[in-house]
Amino acid sequence: MHSLNGRRRSIWVADFETTTDPDDCRVWGWGIADIEMPDDVAVGTDIASFIRRVADSDKTIYFHNLKFDGAFIIDYLFRSGYAHTSERNVRRGRFSTLISSMGMFYSIKVHWKNGRETEFRDSLKKLPMSVANVAHAFNQTESKGEIDYETFRPVGHDLTAEEADYIRRDVAIIANAIRVQTDEGMSRLTVGADSLAQFKTMTGKKKFDRLFPVLSADVDAQIRRAYRGGFTYADPRAKGKIVGPGRVFDVNSLYPSVMFDRALPHGVPEPFIGEPGHVPGHPLSIIHLTFTAKLKPNHIPCIQIKGSSRFTETEYQTDIKEPVTISCTNIDLALWEEHYDLHVVEFHGGWAFKAATGIFSEYITKWMQVKETTHGGLRVIAKLFLNSLYGKFATNPDVTPKVPIMGDDNIVRLVTGPEETREPVYTAMGAFITAYARDVTIRAAQHHYDDFLYADTDSLHLLGTGVPDTLDVHPSRLGAWKHEYDFTSAVFARAKCYTELKANGELETHIAGLPDSIASMVRFEHYRTGHTFHGKLMPVRVPGGIVLQPTSFQLQV
């Protein structure tokens, strides 16, 4: 059960099926089920009947991609005389939204005119995978169905048995999964928030507050400049070529592994001037420095420059001739000094931190044990808890929202709302965890430089066969490299863009932003010809909600 304004609400899952005609955008089918009775799915054929159904009692309702389905709800609310509000307590006849500055939907709260209240939430923030993958991961007997989305369905169309079953499956799959999460106490808006709540409970509030004091906005902003993501890199020696045979290794729980046994920051940091390393009892540093750098021969580049017109943010630099000023952790700096001829023009000081190992050991041990000893839903939850916690520490305190308005063209638009901030958690933790994770992957790639082809955060793709003696390989041990599969041939075009022919004959293609249905059609020759694929669906806002319109994607090396 959830509560809104102190009132208890039951938890439901719903799904919309909508038309694809921009001149006739509407809901033609819907389904809804209480998670306590996930297979008892009620269905209907228009949004008005859906609203009548949900407004009959206080509910929390999950949609799997609220950004899409919520567009139809907001459109309906505006057209029905409801006003948007930014007030915390939503008054009767109004609704509020929680939409990030990047347009990510988290919730829509409605106080219906009859006095009932509903909060619509995004189950994709709790289960970050497709409906089909949810069914598989949770070992459900139900599987996702198929229908023809392009079939014309006029107003008043009665659902066919096939359509009703398709909707029922989608709702039941997510409802069963949300019920498992709810039974485990996962009541927050996102799995990251659930993870942090779980860690706080295990740690205790007093200890958590002592370890991770709230820092000022200015100090947090300085530390945040050192926060970076994973290492993803296609080696130019193989770029665009058909190579192979090869093998792929993934770290078993990379982020949890460095959280488990690395020295991590805590407490109030001490400012320092000039070079790092001179604050007693504070071995970790966030460093601000100006430097030039030239990559050493036979070394993998690992410096990215963000926020500069002189550099492409996604590229790793090989020759920085003009001095640049950036921030990094001392873990990053040590790695850069090994890979580059680095000339520091000036150290501008920074922040020094106390360090401790074992901060997360109890949490990691608990969820690793669950992951290794259970199957289905509990194993999924364990993996989510293991991989979602670190990012929550670096949550951006700038939470200025987008808010919906009804435009003069009768289309709902999102505009920037009033500036809003919240307290940071402890950004330095996110900065050091990701730095240690990059360090693991980059050092392993460099150690196998002669065979290195590609890396993506926690994976290595190496030329050759067999398991190298120099890599710690184990199928499940925390922090070891798992031998995922072998491939007979592959093409690595760039970061997040490659295809491998696995030894079992399956093609494995990963192209950022390309749906699996289209990626499955990619062949090696398409990289050479710059093949154009059709059918990638792009959301377009129109009166009534959103339509998904097909567009083209050209494969470029």
Image (spheres, rainbow, N blue to C red):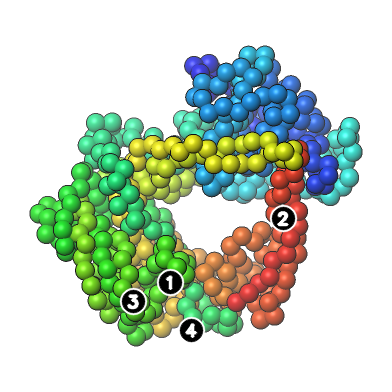
Which sits in the foreground, 246 or 283? 283
Frontmost of labels 4 and 1 is 1
User: Which mark sits nearer the N-terminus, 3 or 4?
Assistant: 4
Residue drawn at point x = 70 percent, y = 63 percent: 518
Residue type (three-letter) at the residue carrying disc 4: Arg
- Disc 2: which residue: 537
Q: Mark 3 and mark 2 in contact? Answer it, CB < 8 Å.
A: no
Residue 147, position as x, y percentages in the image = 81, 47
Disc 4: which residue = 237
Q: Is 119 on the left or on the right of 347, as rendered?
A: right
Amino acid type indicated by mark 3? Glu
- The residue furthest top is 114
1 or 3: tag closer to the N-terminus: 1
Which residue in the structure is indicated by mark 1? 310
Distance CA(mark 3)–CA(mark 2): 42 Å
In percent of width and height, residue 555 lies at 66, 72
Amino acid carrying label 2: it is Leu
Q: Quadrant of the C terminus?
A: bottom right
Dots 3 and 4: beta carbons under 8 Å?
A: no
**Which residue is drawn at the image coordinates 76% and 30% (left, top)?**
47
Q: Quadrant of residue 523?
A: bottom right
Which residue position holds label 3?
322
Residues at marks 2 and 1, CA–CA distance in whole angstroms: 33 Å
**Does dot 2 land on a helix, a strand or a loop?**
strand
Nearest to viewer (mark 3 / mark 4): 3
Q: In this view, does 341 lie to the left or right of 162?
A: left
Residue 225 showing in the rendered view:
yes
* Circle 1/circle 3 CB separation < 8 Å: yes
Task: Give the residue at x 69% y 29%.
Answer: 78
The mark that comes first in sequence, 4 or 2, is 4
